[in-house]
Amino acid sequence: MRNLTRAVKIGSVTIGNNNPIAVQTMASTRTNNTKELIEQIKTFENVGADIVRIAIDSKTDVESLKKIRDNTRMNLAVDIQENYRLIEPIAKIVDKVRYNPGHLWHHEPEKSWQDKVKFIAETAGKNNCALRVGINCGSVDPDLMKKYNQDSTSAMLENAFDHCSLLDRIGFTSYCVSLKDSDPNTVVELNVKFSEQRPDVPLHLGVTEAGLPNYGIIKTRIAFEQLISRGIGDTIRVSLTLPSDRKYEEIIVGKRILEDIINKRVIGNVRYDKDGLNLISCPSCSRVENEKFIELTGEVEKLTRYANDLIKGYAVTIAIMGCRVNGPGETMNADLGLWCGPRNVNLMRASRRIGAYSYDTILPVLKIELDKIISEKR
Ligand code: SF4
């Protein structure tokens, strides 16, 4: 039995109100490379994607969106970052906009987040554009983190409830919510708690930075099985670190997980064991600054396998991110973080910067730092 959430129309797809769970993905080619982006979106269409999301950072990306709209049949969603005003030119082109409450405080800090959300909702409303309130563990509102003493689960939930209440008061109901974390147990906890209080709001499910397919599929499956079997979830995104020409596999994996849940081919009520080496990596999107990031993630996975036998009874997390927009924030909670720029990879030990290294020289430095952590923890 599914939660009876309200219906939200995203182009030709409607999520919520017992409609089939929509499967979506995110484009990973650069937004201004329209030709390649259209080709990539066609590969998503071919495997039956319902919605594709594109990250935009500037007004120049708006022209590309128009061309994509004219050349594909796909329902389009767009991710806006700090500059919430970008919704104005894009709401008339796309079917849904995702804003991140944790990013609203950067741009025009003198304005309240409530005024910014009002602007976003009114602009979306005038253009029949849906919204997603996309809350992510790597960019939680700093005031709420302080209020909850760095407990991100409580901060994320309060953030989601606050935004829903404001949108409701404004009279904007065409929205869904996502609460993403890289730990599937936390994703389950967040979404269960949210839907207990707001069973009417459609949920977009996803495990963020799930990593390479061999880790990411299992983490995502664990979260989706537990949530969807409880009736929670109206649209899904599987986030896997894949090169652009294999990005469509996220849709295939998502559909396969849904089919398995319907047919009860499930793992069961597994808890994800956080002990040991935990490699998390972003799925990449149009903001990736150097495609070598994907290759590097594979190399880090191979290099660090030796640590699995050495780390028993405690956890070490290594996070690899593809850009400077979200990289610094999202590597902060890991023991070791690598965020990738155009030429260099920045190596972090929690919030301390160790240095910037070329893609060819980073691995030996990473190993030295990992060895230090293992011997300290032992
Ligand atoms: S970290 Fe950057 S490149 Fe990776 S998915 Fe997030 S925004 Fe895109």
Image: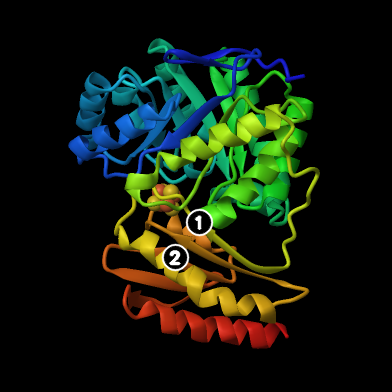
**What numbered label is drawn on residue 233?**
none
* Screen quadrant of the N terminus: top right
- The residue lying at 42 percent from left, 30 percent from top is 47
Residue under numbered circle 1: 212
Residue 225 location, quadrant: top right
Instruction: For the residues labelled 1 and 2, say whether their Cβ atoms are less than 8 Å apart.
Output: yes
Decide: few, some or many residues near mark 2? Use Cα within 10 Å; few <14, some 14-19, many ≥20.
Answer: some
Give me the residue at 72% from left, 41% from top: 188
- Residue 297: give x, y in percent of width and height: 44, 64
Q: Is residue 3 above or below residue 357?
A: above
The amino acid at mark 1 is Leu
- In this figure, which residue is indicated by the disc labeled 2? 298
Quadrant where the image shows the C terminus: bottom right
- SS state under label 2: helix
Position of residue 86 in the picture relative to residue 319 (left or right): left
- Label 1, label 2: how far apart the Cα atoms are: 8 Å
Query: Which is more N-terminal, label 2 or label 1?
Result: 1
Left or right of residue 270, residue 172 in this image: left
